[in-house]
Image (cartoon, grey):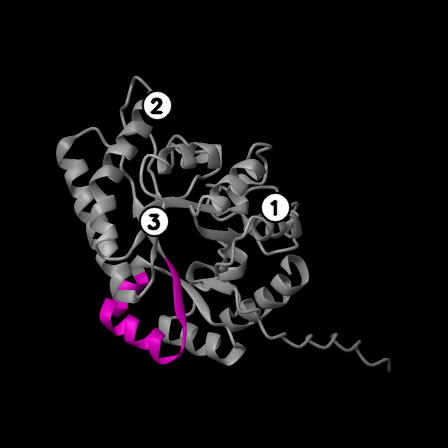
């Protein structure tokens, strides 16, 4: 009787480069303590956190846990959602963002990532420029508050398919035009390859952001098709899609960027898998496709 074929051996996990950071959402199935332990076991030094699981665990407890493992919090996600017209809604958004800034400071990160928000429900004039101006108004209110706590605000442009309901800032150029109304050490941008890879103006904007000290966060995710229903969870594992990560890494490095690079994946298949295995594979993919 012929024996079944042997499964190929699992390749070893290389030591992650010092600039590598794992965004918590990539392995959201791992509770925070398990994520911290897994990062320490693999030699990962940076982690990007999300507000909801941190709040659930306790902000101060999370800060102590991460520091105790020798990890650095590279970003906190997310603030933003500034586009409401209703004064009461805008006041609630500003209050929530001040809380997010306080949480970032408590966690020891200098960067809060902002998603601007989409067109307000029922906004019949469909006025994208006016919505972006409301984002600028919110930044004017929040930037001094953040600066007093040594936290930078990083505007993240999202792919245009999210403009209606999630983010009226669709290109890196639009994000920079907003950011440049404020000091560079207060407001900059977060560039995620998933959202900008398609834009032929993005390379110049990325160089502009880096050379002016406004690239506050740099994230990687691959673009794979077909997109899933709802499109939010379509971010592919590095190497599974169409994005040339060496190209984007070269752009920021040649312009002088020396900060961390986060891998942030929203993917139902990855979330249904063993979180430690996903984390190990992400390190392998980063070394293979982005270094």
- In the picture shown, does residue 112 fall above or below 90? below
**Element carrying mark 1:** loop
Is 194 in the magenta?
Answer: no
Q: Which residue is drawn at the image coordinates 36% and 24% (left, top)?
A: 128
Alpha carbons under labels 1 and 2: distance apart = 30 Å
In the rendered image, which residue does mark 3 sit on? 185
Q: Is residue 173 left or right of residue 153?
A: right
Is 57 in the magenta?
Answer: yes
Q: Residues within 10 Å of mark 1 (few under 14, many from 20)?
A: some
What percent of the width, then of the height, locates residue 94? 19, 43
Tag nearer the camera, 3 or 2? 3
The mark nearer the N terminus, 1 or 2, is 2
> Looking at the rendered structure, which numbered label has been put on residue 224?
1
Q: Which residue is drawn at the image coordinates 46% and 41% (left, top)?
A: 230
The mark nearer the N terminus, 3 or 2, is 2
- In the picture shown, does residue 169 fall above or below 11? above
Q: Which residue is drawn at the image coordinates 52% and 70% (left, top)?
A: 274
Tag nearer the camera, 3 or 1? 3
**Residue 183: quadrant of the picture:** top left
In the rendered image, which residue does mark 2 sit on? 129
**Element carrying mark 3:** loop
> Looking at the rendered structure, which numbered label has been put on residue 240?
none
Q: Please provide the residue range marked out in magenta.
A: 53-75
What percent of the width, then of the height, locates residue 113? 36, 50
Alpha carbons under labels 3 and 1: distance apart = 34 Å
Q: Is residue 214 left or right of residue 236?
A: left
Q: Is residue 65 left or right of residue 1?
A: left
From this viewpoint, which residue is outermost toward the left? 88
Along the line of sight, the residue nearer the viewer: 140 or 101: 140
What percent of the width, then of the height, locates residue 131? 30, 27
Along the line of sight, the residue nearer the viewer: 71 or 22: 71
Residue 171 in view in this figure: no
């Amino acid at each position: 009787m012929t024996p079944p074929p042997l499964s190929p051996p699992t390749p070893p996990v290389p030591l992650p480069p010092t600039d590598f950071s794992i965004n918590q959402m990539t392995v959201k199935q791992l509770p925070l303590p398990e994520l911290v332990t897994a990062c320490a076991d693999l030699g990962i030094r940076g982690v990007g956190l999300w507000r909801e699981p941190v709040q659930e665990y306790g902000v101060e407890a999370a800060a102590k846990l991460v520091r105790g493992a020798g990890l650095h919090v590279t970003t906190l996600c997310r603030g933003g959602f500034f586009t409401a017209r209703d004064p009461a809604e805008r006041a609630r958004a500003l209050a929530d963002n001040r809380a997010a800034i306080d949480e970032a400071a408590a966690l020891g990160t200098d960067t809060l990532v902002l998603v601007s928000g989409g067109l307000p429900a029922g906004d019949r004039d469909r006025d994208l420029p006016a919505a972006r101006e409301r984002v600028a108004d919110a930044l004017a209110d929040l930037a001094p508050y953040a600066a007093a706590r040594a936290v930078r605000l990083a505007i993240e442009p999202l792919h245009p398919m999210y403009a209606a309901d999630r983010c009226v800032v669709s290109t890196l150029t639009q994000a920079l035009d907003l950011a440049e109304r404020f000091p560079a050490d207060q407001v900059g941008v977060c560039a995620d390859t998933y959202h900008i890879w398609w834009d032929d103006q993005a390379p110049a904007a990325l160089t502009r952001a880096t050379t002016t000290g406004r690239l506050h966060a740099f994230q990687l995710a691959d673009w794979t098709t077909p997109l899933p229903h709802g499109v939010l969870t379509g971010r592919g594992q590095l190497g599974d899609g169409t994005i040339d990560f060496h190209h984007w890494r070269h752009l920021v490095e040649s312009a002088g960027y020396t900060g961390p690079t986060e891998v942030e994946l929203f993917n139902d298949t990855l979330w249904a898998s063993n979180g430690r295995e996903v984390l190990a594979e992400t390190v392998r993919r980063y070394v293979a496709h982005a270094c």
